[in-house]
Amino acid sequence: MNIYNQLLEVIQIKGAAFLVLLDPDNLHEEKVARFARHCENSGVDGFLVGGSLLLNDNLESFLLKLKAVTTLPAIIFPGDVNQISSKADAILYLSVVSGRNPEHLIGKHVLAAPIIKKCGIEPIATGYLLIESGRTTTAQYMSGSLPIPRNKPGIAAATALAAEYLGMKLIYLEAGSGADNSIPNEMVKAVSELCTVPVVVGGGIKTPATAKEKVENGAKIIVTGNFFEDEVNWNLIKDFAEAIHVNLPVLV
Ligand code: 1GP
């Protein structure tokens, strides 16, 4: 089964999927194995690997370490064309549809397509919407585009529907890694009601209750990254998983 269908199956069974973002610049390679095992044992459904800007050239060795200890899918979350590797299972083929920068709508994709083909990994076409979340985030800055105002759920919903009509298989509402504010619930709801493809919500989610709110408003995949870069928070991963997996009974 391909990774996209695996995600759909998780969503169907558990109500929503929980992905943890690993930024190879921020998670030391010595910790990868321990963290990945902990995530798998705590109910995480898969990993996104990448970042808007990777300063260390270690994506390949990072993925090898990750895949050696877990059977969970490793999906590249690329900030640029240099973040493609055959060691991953799939790649989010992100088009920044919230912006009007042609490089991030189609330019980078032309460069990436033959490399992805050669690597043999699964591209998952994703409509990526950057949403205003307080301070300018790395994703916003690097994309060279304006985010959608956070008080305009209608613009987000229309943009997401256009991406779905263009054939994209996921809609990703992105507040930005470490965002001050997560995506507003009203916006998650407006987009989820209009679209039939799964809606991913990420950026600035720091509590299980916030993650649950997003699912209750229609999100089908929750992404957290920053919060678990501090090891003291690792014991909360299970609570996040239980909050997100709304169809599963909570085990006490
Ligand atoms: C960022 O959506 C992801 O691209 C996760 O954001 O690091 O704030 O959890 P955080």
Image (tube, grey):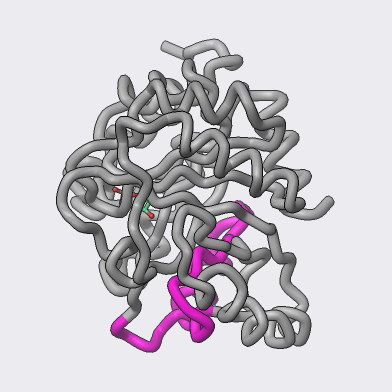
Identity of the residue drawn at 60% across and 21% down:
193
- In-image side of 203 versus 119 (left or right): left
Question: As rendered, which of 71 and 241 lies closer to the eye?
Answer: 241
- In-image side of 224 versus 80 (left or right): left
Identity of the residue drawn at 37% across and 54% down:
35
Identity of the residue drawn at 55% across and 11% down:
249
User: Start and end of the magenta stretch?
Assistant: 55-83
Residue 13 x/y as whole percent: 70, 24
- In-image side of 5 versus 27 (left or right): right
Residue 40 x/y as whole percent: 50, 45
Look at the image and say whether residue 190 sits in the magenta stretch. Answer: no
Look at the image and say whether residue 63 sits in the magenta stretch. Answer: yes
Picture layout, residue 88 above or below residue 252: below
Question: As rendered, which of 33 and 189 lies closer to the eye?
Answer: 189
Identity of the residue drawn at 23% across and 47% down:
179
Dividing the image into 4 quarters, which one contains the C terminus?
top left
Picture layout, residue 39 above or below residue 70: above
Q: Is residue 29 visible?
A: no
